[in-house]
Every structure is written in structure tokens, then in C-alpha cells.
Amino acid sequence: MAVYKVMVDDNFHYMDEDARYEHGSYDSPAEAIEICRRIVDDDLRELHKPGMTPTELYDDYKSFGRDPFIVAPEGAERVTFSAWTYAEERCRDQAK
């Protein structure tokens, strides 16, 4: 059975692999993507302050949020998930 690892970088420690950790392993790409989305959503909720604009929230996320990504097992198709793109979409949705 394939195992998809969700790894997490810390935007505050950009490019610091020592700050990276494994969040968990999942049986399918869909499950791993859902976990990544949940991590980003949790951070956006925590970072949001009353009166904040979507742009301000997104900027705070890029500075202080977590940046999850998926590592596919050897031989499996690469799973694409961009935490920054997803966060930007969620911030835009919040403005609606």
C-alpha cells in the first residue's frame, strides 16, 4: 500500500529544513491533500483578527503560518498541493 507523507515547513523559518517535521502518513493523495488543507485552515483561523483584510491575513499566513506539502512514495505520481495558493484562495473567499 502506498503511503503519502505530509511534511510541514514553517513560513517563519523559511528554507530552514531543521524546522521541518513530518505531520503523518496517509493512504491516498486525497487524504493527504485534505490534511494539508486542514493545517492551512487552522492557521488562518488562528491568525485572523477582527477587521483584518484578506490581504493582511494572507500576508500574516506567509510570514507565520505552516507550509504543508506532500511527499509521494517512490514510483507513485507526484501529488501537487500549494499551501500558499490554497491560503490565498481561502483568504479571497473570506472577503465574499
Image (tube, grey):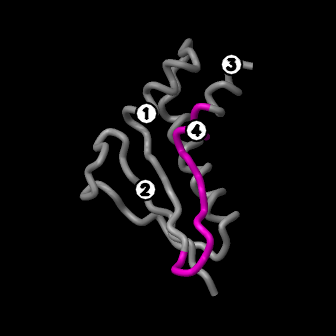
Q: Residue at x 57, y 78 (%)?
A: 3
Residue at the disc numbered 3: 95
What number is the disc on residue 85? 4
Q: Residues within 10 Å of mark 2 (few under 14, many from 20)?
A: many
Task: Say which quarter of the image contains residue 27.
Answer: bottom right
Q: Position of residue 45 (x, y in %)?
A: 56, 34
Q: Which residues are magenta?
A: 73-88
Whether residue 80 appears in magenta in the rendering, the answer is: yes
Disc 1 residue type (three-letter):
Lys
Q: Secondary structure at mark 1?
A: helix
What number is the disc on residue 62? 1
Residue at the disc numbered 2: 8
Q: Secondary structure at mark 4?
A: helix
Q: CA distance from mark 3 to mark 1?
A: 18 Å
Q: Which is more foreground, mark 2 or mark 4?
A: 4
Q: Are marks 2 and 4 in contact (CB under 8 Å)?
A: no
Disc 2 residue type (three-letter):
Val
